[in-house]
Image: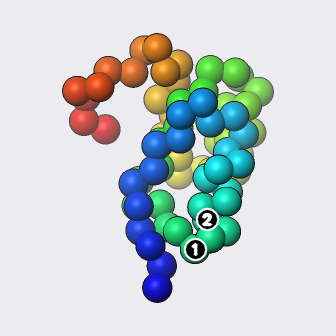
Amino acid sequence: MKKEIVYLDLFSGVGGFAKALLSAGFIFKRHYFSEKDPFACANYRYNFKQAISLGDIKKILGKKNY
């Protein structure tokens, strides 16, 4: 059975952990990531087109509903 999750990838880099979860059979119901390096962000967006960028972790507000 596939496991559907809401995934928040902090300090995401190029998405190694996200890739591992997908390979392990997880499905992202919603997928967010936080990274500030522009090259890593470009790579992440290329590999995970449905992922929503939250930008720099220092600027994420905890109470906002995404």
The quarter of the displayed image where residue 39 is located: top right
Front one among 15 and 48: 15
How many residues crowd around disc 1 within 10 Å: few (fewer than 14), some, or many (20 or more)? few
Q: Quadrant of the C terminus?
A: top left
**Residue that appears at 53% across and 51% down:** 50
Placement of 39 over or under 16, stated as above or below: above
- Residues tagged 1 and 2 counted as in contact (Cβ below 8 A): yes
SS at mark 1 in the image: loop
Placement of 23 over or under 38, stated as above or below: below
The spot of residue 3 in percent (x, y) is 44, 73
Q: Is residue 21 left or right of residue 63?
A: right
Q: Which residue is mark 2?
A: 22
Residue that sits furthest to the top in the current view: 58
The spot of residue 33 in percent (x, y) is 53, 37
Q: Which residue is mark 1?
A: 25
Q: Is residue 40 left or right of residue 63?
A: right
**Residue that appears at 67% across and 68% down:** 23
**Residue that appears at 42% across and 15% down:** 59
**Residue that appears at 62% across and 70% down:** 24
The spot of residue 41 in percent (x, y) is 67, 31
